[in-house]
Image (cartoon, rainbow, N blue to C red):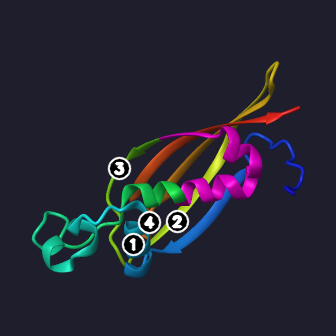
Amino acid sequence: MDEPITIPEVGESLGPLDILVTPERVRAYADAANDHNPIHLDPTFAATTHFGGPIVHGMLLLAYLARVLGARFGRAWRENGILEARFRGPAMVGSSVRVQGTVSAVTETMDGIQIECALHCADPSGRMLVQATARVRLNR
């Protein structure tokens, strides 16, 4: 059973989550998603692209954002979370990424408490890879 979820305060930090995106993680994701595009898996092929090497699946990066949200909002996130994201740049396979965010709004509604969060995923240099807004409703 999930723990009770406390209502967050505006400004509350989410994360950080630091992940080394290894070739093994990318391969496992490719197998699970049945997405075997060589831009993600074949270093020889990927070296011939403008990226210069294999890049991480964008949906895998979104899964890391969802992991941070799930850790904070549990069942509520799984049942009614909404994530809107913009990809800003590729993550290279073998690099680290950091996911973090902030609660940007807490609004009482007739259905419960609506939470809005701003999140991002960046590489070690701070280059933005994904920017996202998440919404989740906490029932009364």
- Specify few, some or many for label 3: CA neighbours under 10 Å numbering under 14, 14-19, or 20 or more: some
Q: What amino acid type is highlighted by mark number 1? A: Val
Q: Which residue is mark 2?
A: 98
Query: Contact (CB < 8 A) between labels 3 and 1?
Result: no
Image disc number at residue 89? none
Q: What amino acid type is highlighted by mark number 2? A: Arg
Q: Which residue is mark 4?
A: 32
Residue in the foreground of this view, choosing between 66 and 10: 66
Secondary structure of the residue carrying tag 1 is helix
Looking at the image, is mark 1 or mark 4 nearer the viewer?
Answer: 4
Magenta residues?
64-84
Outermost residue toward the top in this view: 110
Outermost residue toward the left in this view: 48
> Can you give x and y, in whole percent of width and height, for residue 47 in the image?
15, 74
Looking at the image, is mark 4 or mark 2 nearer the viewer?
Answer: 4
> What residue is drawn where x is 14% and y is 63%?
50
Q: Which residue is mark 3?
A: 88
Residue 74 on the magenta segment: yes
Image disc number at residue 26? 1
Distance, label 3 to label 1, CA atoms, is 19 Å
Q: Which quadrant holds the C terminus?
A: top right
- Specify few, some or many for label 1: CA neighbours under 10 Å numbering under 14, 14-19, or 20 or more: many
> What residue is drawn where x is 61% and y is 51%?
101
> Can you give x and y, in whole percent of width and height, for residue 96 in the image?
45, 74
Which one is earlier in the sequence, the residue at label 2 or at label 3? 3
Residue in the foreground of this view, choosing between 93 and 104: 93
> What residue is drawn where x is 69% and y is 42%?
79
> Can you give x and y, in whole percent of width and height, for residue 108 in the image?
81, 25
Looking at the image, is mark 1 or mark 2 nearer the viewer?
Answer: 1
Which one is earlier in the sequence, the residue at label 1 or at label 4? 1
Distance, label 4 to label 2, CA atoms, is 23 Å
